[in-house]
Amino acid sequence: MSHLIRPTRRGFMTGAAALAGAATLRFPTPALAQSDRPDLVIAVQGLVDNLEPIAAISNVGMRVVNAMYDTLLYRNFLANPDGSGAVIEPGLATGVERLNDRTVRVTLRDDVVFHNSEPMTAQDVAFSFGYDRMFGPEPLTPRAAYFRPDLAEVSVIDDSTVEFVTNGPDYAMEKRLASWIGWVVPEGYFRDKGLDGFGTAPIGTGPYKLKEFLRGDRVVLEANDDYWRGRPTARTVTFVVVPETATRVAGLISGEYHIACALNPDNIPLLQRYNEVEGRGAQIENTHLVVHNQVDNVLADKRVRRAMHKCIDRDALNTALWAGLAGVTNGFQLPMQGEAYDPNRAPYRQDIEGAKALLAEAGYSGKPITYRTLNDYYVNSVAAAQAMQQWWQEAGLNVEIEIKENWGQVTGDGLMSRNWSNGFPLTDPVTPLTTDWHEGSNVQKNYGWKAPEEFNALLGKIRSMPNSPERSAAFQRALDIFDDEAPGTPLYRPYELYGIQSSIGWSPVTFEWMELRPHNLAFD
Amino acid sequence: MHFSIRQSASAVRQSSPVLVAACLWLGLMVFVAVFAPWIAPYGYAEQDLLLRLQPPSFAGGPPGHWLGTDHLGRDVFSRAIYSIRISMAVAFFGALIGAVFGTALGALAAHRRGLVEEIVMGLVDVQAALPFLIFALLVIAFFGNELFLFVLVVGFQGWERYARLARGLVLDAKTRGYAAAARSMGLPLWRVYLVHIGPNIAGAMAVQFTLNLPETIILEAGLSFLGLGIQPPLTSLGLMLNDSRNYIVLHWWLPAVPGALIFVTALSMSLIGDGLRDWFDRSQR
């Protein structure tokens, strides 16, 4: 059983089509032309401390990572005009061939160089996904354990071929190689620097390379003129931290920033007042969640967790806080998960009386439950917390909101409930269930969730089966258990709203990153 | 020096209409603070998500929400009422803590002299040299944010001024005959300080207290605005301002209401403090 992915031109933006052909030609890069290109400034709500591409997985990390690195295969979000495309196209690999249910082979481009001018080799690719970095007992990137496929071996077949073998069947491998674990890093440089060293002075193959990194303040990238997909269209890209939404909007309107990320739908009427700026956005493949740490507290009783879950009126949150632009899901699933998605699954309904009954049954005595959140990290997080708190109170749940300064304080001592988000990066049921809620996940390992055996067995099935009615049934059954156990509960699909100078040609995609490659960034 | 109602009343009568207005305003604020739950038509956390960001009823908003609603559909008028209560309480008790603590330390320094005085006055200098906001940030970052701790932190502001003032006044009082007389009659120390020296320095301390109050109001507002003060769902004037950040341009009533309340209240307190000082200076003469 094998198939070869070929580039699909369908839906490509015109510029991109030209660039795909031009990739091998290489643009000449006259020194004078440097100044034609603008310096792009993007105001963001936060930055990660480590730009190693897997360590950086988060709502604020991926947009920088995607500008600096490439994935082996490329998910072309822009194949759909609304940025939701799921077409897998060649990336650093020109093709992918499936040998059997456990084995996938990729053929590599031979014209890719890293930012330090070293050519990208098969060894670099094997290292990026390999035993030492990703799946050994002490991986150089420990965080890979949460996101990686169940790899058994990654080996170099020849100079342009790398083979991936998983322990069990893995039909999502191609999607994984196009996802947020699919970045390729240079082996020698990475080993030299180690995780933290690399994260401070990272090197990738992407359109922009690091120029300056001031933790918590800004990341400045400059064009990588040798980029294999063509010459980047901005001279530099600066991600500057502006924690306040209102300040990001003000800076956008004043012209200080070209793009302002993570705006609130309440900002739209203001943006509409100015001709020079506009709002662009998309519902992203992500849900905001409430997640519970159940160790030694009242949340160990699933009836209390379910009561919290039942109190939430997601439609009201969407209508009021998101101007109806967010997505209310029916269960912990999204349509782009494909065949296993059940459009007829019953939506979540607010049921305060049901919550009261559960609490009475559990003998909940009004013991305080703390709910932690950062201020503006997730758009609308504090407003949603306050709205939920009212509903919880109505049901008799004594929830106290704690607004924290940083993630260390949120996840530190005394954690009970908090907000969180899960990405759905694979257009497949494997994420986020088998990555964020599985046996080795933080929630099961550290937050004391004792998942039923059946749940973990179902995750194994979902992970290892090809799409089939049986897999869909396993997925739906796992979702039933998830809702019954309520180790956490999804709120809504957030609407990622960008404010942008109207003259800039750029489209958002349905994921928590930005596409800044030449085919999606044009200046007048 | 005699305090009497008649004298105070005449002092108010002689003073400018501005001072009268300030007194009336502050009186109103105290009244609102005390009777907040009876005045406010809604609870401070009571939401109506479908009726959010409504302008005040006089500006075309729905009736029943005189000052409009905020981003969670909470009644701005009711929140303002409760915010006055919380902010006034934090400011008052905060200032009181500073006054009691500072005065006690100042009196102790004046009484003991020597090393104790050196240490106390050293601390006073440190406190005076320390940017207070940084100190407040540090304490809250280390010990977390509890209402009680927050009041303590607010109370810490300005204690050094009371300490300095109290030390000077007590030193002065000790040279006066009445203190020496009381002491030589064999009265216990606490009686000398509380019954004899205390009332004699109370006027000056009261002036200092009134002058300090507006600063504590603004400090509460500042810290809450920075997210370090009062935590939701509780409300305060600073927190209301904080909530309104995102809405300044299109929903003017959200910042305007708490902003105006902070401004007018702090100004009134300041004016009253000045008036009290002037009156006190005159009566000293």
Image (cartoon, rainbow, N blue to C red):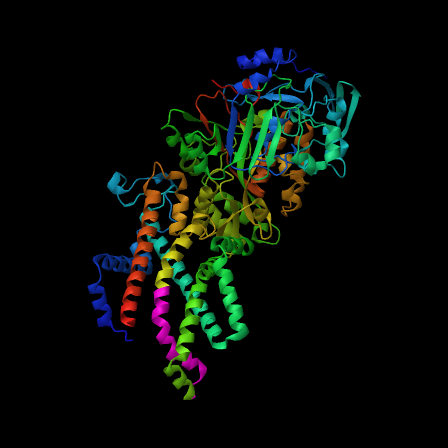
Q: Nearer the viewer, residue B65 or B200?
A: B200
User: Which residue of the protein is positioned furthest toward the bottom in this rendering?
Assistant: B185
Q: Quadrant of residue A71?
A: top right
The image position of residue A32, as x and y in percent, is 57, 17
Examine the rendered structure and indicate whether residue A309 appears above or below residue B122. Answer: above
Left or right: where does residue B77 sit relative to residue A361? Answer: left
Q: B162 or B244: which is nearer to us?
A: B162
- Was residue B197 drawn as part of the magenta stretch in this picture? yes
Residue found at x 69% / y 37%: A197
- Can you give x and y, in whole percent of width and height, for residue B99 in the image? 42, 66
Instruction: Give the position of the N terminus of chain A as an image quadrant.
Output: top right
Question: In this picture, is A272 found above or below A200?
Answer: above
Q: How many marks?
A: 0
A508 left or right of B238 in image: right
Q: Is residue A9 visible?
A: no
A409 falls in the magenta region = no
Q: Position of residue A514 (x, y in %)?
A: 55, 27
Q: Position of residue A440 (x, y in %)?
A: 68, 40
Q: Please tell me whether residue A245 is drawn above or below residue B160 in the rendered image.
A: above
State the predominant SS element of the stretch in magenta: helix
Which residues are the magenta region?
A: B186-208
> Please, is residue B230 above or below residue A311 in the view?
below
**In this view of the protein, can residue B261 be seen by the observer?**
yes
Nearest the camera: A161 or A204?
Answer: A204
Res A296 quadrant in image: bottom right
